[in-house]
Image (tube, rainbow, N blue to C red):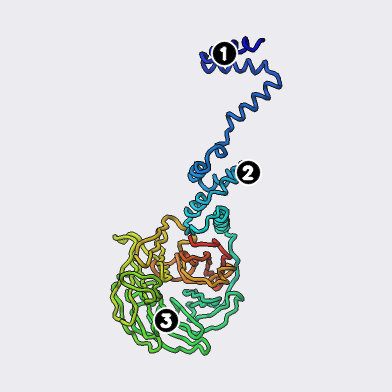
Amino acid sequence: MEMTDFQRWLESVSTTFLTLNDRQRNQALDHIIFHSGAAQLRHLSNGLEALLKRDFLRLLPLELAFYLLRWLDPQTLLTCCLVCKQWNKVINSCTEVWQNVCRELGWRIDESIQDASHWKGVYLKAKLRMVQLKDQKAFETSSLIGHSARVYALYYNDGLLCTGSDDLSAKLWDVRTGQCIYGIQTHTCATVKFDEQKLVTGSFDNTIACWDWSTGAKIQQFRGHTGAVFSLDYNDEMDMLVSGSADFTVKVWALAAGVCLNTLTGHTEWVTKVILQKSEVESVVHSPGDYILLSADKYEIKIWPFGKEINCKCLKTLSVSENRSISLQPRLQFDGRHIVCSSDIGVYQWDFSSFEILRKRTGKITILSNLFHLGKMTPRERETCSDVTHISIASDHLPAPSPCHYDITILFNYVARSPIFIALWKTIDRVWDILRLMCILQGGGI
């Protein structure tokens, strides 16, 4: 057939084809395909692949491709990386996409790091640790045996763990070796804190005592509370000790003399946590370097200026619900810049310069909600991420707001710019199973 005749025939067939309905078109195509040879079928296959399998990610401008990728969930992004090398290259070059993925995990993003592979690695490591936690494969387990009754109080400092028990004793352990270094006969301990020379204990007998590690002798006793002492903190430089009690008060003591200097009132529930810490930020009511006292009960956190003037007035009261529908747990931490506390529905973080809530993690938080601790790590700890750095006590098995016993979960450096650690503590008769997490998340705070 001549070319002119072929063109005339092709136009006639095309015009007629356009007048057919879908069923007739399909039948016409089936008839043509049936009479086609191998060369025609190969040509048809190549043409259909180009029409039906368009690689939109390759064809789109890079800016539009990145915009579309931002709408995908993390698992879909990872699946798309397996499609082909080109897709993997495009997805792994979009820093903003992986930063958003990490941000959804609660990660604090450092905008100076614009390496997409870094943020993808952060996400993958975090997901791996979460799976390990869920499957209970993220812990190393060891046991400390020594007390003959329930353990009420824990305090960790620089590789040493102090425990206070119902058996009227307190013990100091080397966490790395599991050896008991000191044992002191005390009262029933509801809270403990120690340094190299001394141990300070708060008791259910309404008293506080200071003990010498080397001799086991009672150095000082503090009497004045009319309820159990659930929390204490002290500062040797200021020669002051603060305590929170079931009598709804916070007392300020002269550490060396044992004299009560002031009683702070205003709480309407048991005071289950007190913290004495320097402020690292400035506001209209305090400056960097000022000592601040935080005290918490079931519903409120009170902030007290703590300088030379002992008769201080409450600076600010923080709460998470005006009608007291949400209860706070005795898991309060303060690093000089941020205040973090858990509640029965989640975790709250306040900025200490403005007292505004920065972040709120609500909903069911299984392991992480029990307790968290803000703390700073040494360069060695930050590099190796192999040892726990801080420990405090918590419980979900006693009526709130008692800060004691049994299943204890610890979250380290929750807001600080440090890796995060978790340790689970379980009291089973006379044995403590210490579940030491090697490292949950590396590089930032969630």
Which numbered circle lies on residue 85?
2
Q: At 62% across and 30% down in the image, what residue appears?
A: 49
Q: Earlier in the sequence, mark 3 or mark 2?
A: 2
For mark 3, does the 10 Å Cα neighbourhood hold few (<14), some (14 to 19), or many (20 or more) residues? few
For mark 1, what is the residue? 11
Q: Quadrant of residue 48?
A: top right
The residues tagged by marks 3 and 2 sit, at their Cα atoms, a distance apart of 59 Å
Mark 3 residue element: strand
In this picture, residue 409 sits left or right of residue 262: right
Q: Earlier in the sequence, mark 1 or mark 3?
A: 1
The residues tagged by marks 1 and 3 sit, at their Cα atoms, a distance apart of 96 Å
Residue 167, compared with residue 316, is above or below; it is below
The quarter of the picture where the N terminus appears is top right
For badge 2, the amino acid type reads: Lys
Mark 1 residue element: helix
Which numbered circle lies on residue 299?
none
For badge 1, the amino acid type reads: Glu
Q: Which of these two is toward me, 205 or 354?
A: 354
For mark 3, what is the residue? 235
Residue placed furthest toward the front? 4
Count of number-bearing discs? 3
Q: Nearer the viewer, mark 1 or mark 2?
A: 1
Q: Position of residue 408 (x, y in %)?
A: 49, 67
Residues under numbered marks 1 and 2 in contact, where contact means CB atoms less than 8 Å apart: no
Q: Nearer the viewer, mark 1 or mark 3?
A: 1
Q: Quadrant of residue 146?
A: bottom right
Residue placed furthest toward the right? 38
Q: Position of residue 417 (x, y in %)?
A: 49, 65
